Amino acid sequence: MNRATELFPRLHRPEGGEALRFGARALSYRELAAAAAGVAERIGSARRVAVWATSELETCVAVFGALATGAAVVPVNPKIGQRELAHVLGDSEPELLLAAPGFEAPGELGEVPVHEVDLAPGAGPLPPEPDEEAPALIVYTSGTTGPPKGVVLPRRAIRANLDALAEAWEWTERDVLVHALPLFHVHGLILGTLGPVRLGGTAHHLGRFSSRAVAEELAGSATMLFGVPTMYHRLADDAERDPELAAAVGRARLLVSGSAALPAVEHERIERLTGQRVVERYGMSETIMNSGVRAGGDRRPGYVGLPFDGVEIKLVDEAGATIEVSDDETVGEILVRGRNLFTGYLNRPDATADAFADGWFRTGDVATRAPDGYLRIVGRKATDIIKSGGYKIGAGEIENALLEHPAVAEVAVTGSPDPDLGERIVAWVVPAAPVADEEATARELAGHVAGLLTPHKRPREVRFVESLPRNEMGKVMKKALNG
């Protein structure tokens, strides 16, 4: 079988070469295949397996071993709260939980048996390749509109999407990817861990992010970095102070940012300091990756490029009609179809049906499309489109404008009910320095937006805060601000 049919070809025919590294600990392809075979033997006929997804080699071995058997893997955030853990376990009903040695089982685990994963080799080879439509992962959403939903991703979606990324980013077995992303999300697990192994390359996980550790990797064998905007912000800050660090980052073949929009100001800082322009991409749990800037494409700030191979994207208006214009101004909801899609929400046929329209998945994200087809995400339909004074305004555009002002360190823009405008634009600003006169600074920031964009997009209210609420991936939780 070749790469077109096997999910991880090199594990079935392992040769030398490093597959995974976590700090000083590493596994070659032979060692990873043997250890995964050992886990597969322990799993046996179990069809659904939870993995306590700490950032360790044992987590990766658990995932590869479970996938080899055809079991569906349920990655569990090790910092998960009691109520959410009870929901995830009750909903997914795993037959077994795999964890690294030293795991302390929480009470919510109930009767679920636990197997502590070691790296001992199995007695035989990996099992034969499962069917491509078999569930591979059940990834739980963040639960912003109710209890988290289990997104069922088939092997087909992972295989097709990783191959599309490889083509778009010229990603090969010669690349060494470095990252510090959590292993319970699509970004860190599928892209950052399954991706390199599918391609026969190498992944170096830092455990915890630090600019110094990234620089050391990129000064060595690493060629690619996957990160989120918070990481790139810290990297730029440290590069400002350390020219050697900046030079090391500049050696990367590709810097990729995702999980949230990277502000234009950070794009420009990183280019100025390192000579590198960051590639952005757009995806979500239900679709893996939808679009992205190609390795040889125009890396312009604020845009997530063109649809990946095998992915179709269209924008629709509020009535569901397709938006045909590509003027970079008309806002529409993103609908997606392709082999990258999930098969449904676990135990939620109602939610699955609601998420689709004539075979297209309704993402809930809204965007504009430029004349060359590049997409620009302006936010979530539910929280980032502000209807003010008869206009539909994307919060992301205002946030990027505000971040260009030296007084602003971080910002989130929301809509608040207004009897005259329908909604008024509210900017939640983390100031770059203490603000002596909040009223004067608020007027200055509103004028700054009006001058860069248009007057109707200016904030009607500016609230200064010490920090913005964020989830593990660095996304601002706007419902917490409005709440």
Image: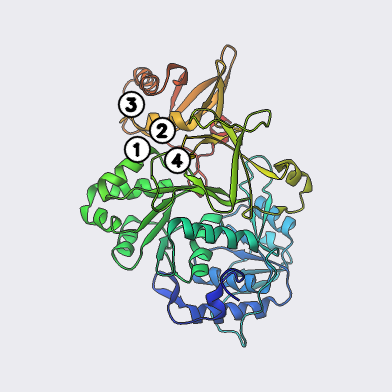
Disc marking residue 210: none
Quadrant of res 109: bottom right
Disc marking residue 265: 1
Q: Position of residue 336 (x, y in %)?
A: 62, 45
Of the residues tagged 3 and 4, which is closer to the observer? Answer: 4
Residue 259 visible at all: no
Quarter occupied by the C terminus = top right
Q: Dot 2, crowdedness within 10 Å: few (<14), some or many (≥20)?
A: many
**Residue of label 2:** 400
> Could you tell me the amino acid type at mark 1?
Val
Mark nearer the N terminus (4 vs 1): 1
Give the spatial CA distance, label 4 vs label 1: 13 Å
Of the residues tagged 2 and 4, which is closer to the observer? Answer: 4
Mark nearer the N terminus (3 vs 4): 4
Image: 155 above or below 142: below
Residues at badges 2 and 1 in contact (C-beta under 8 Å)? yes
> Could you tell me the amino acid type at mark 4?
Tyr
Q: Dot 4, crowdedness within 10 Å: few (<14), some or many (≥20)?
A: many
Q: Where is residue 181 in the image (x, y as percent from the top left)?
A: 47, 57
Give the spatial CA distance, label 3 vs label 4: 32 Å
Tag 4 secondary structure:
loop
Mark nearer the N terminus (3 vs 2): 2
> Could you tell me the amino acid type at mark 3?
Val
Closer to the camera, 20 or 307?
307
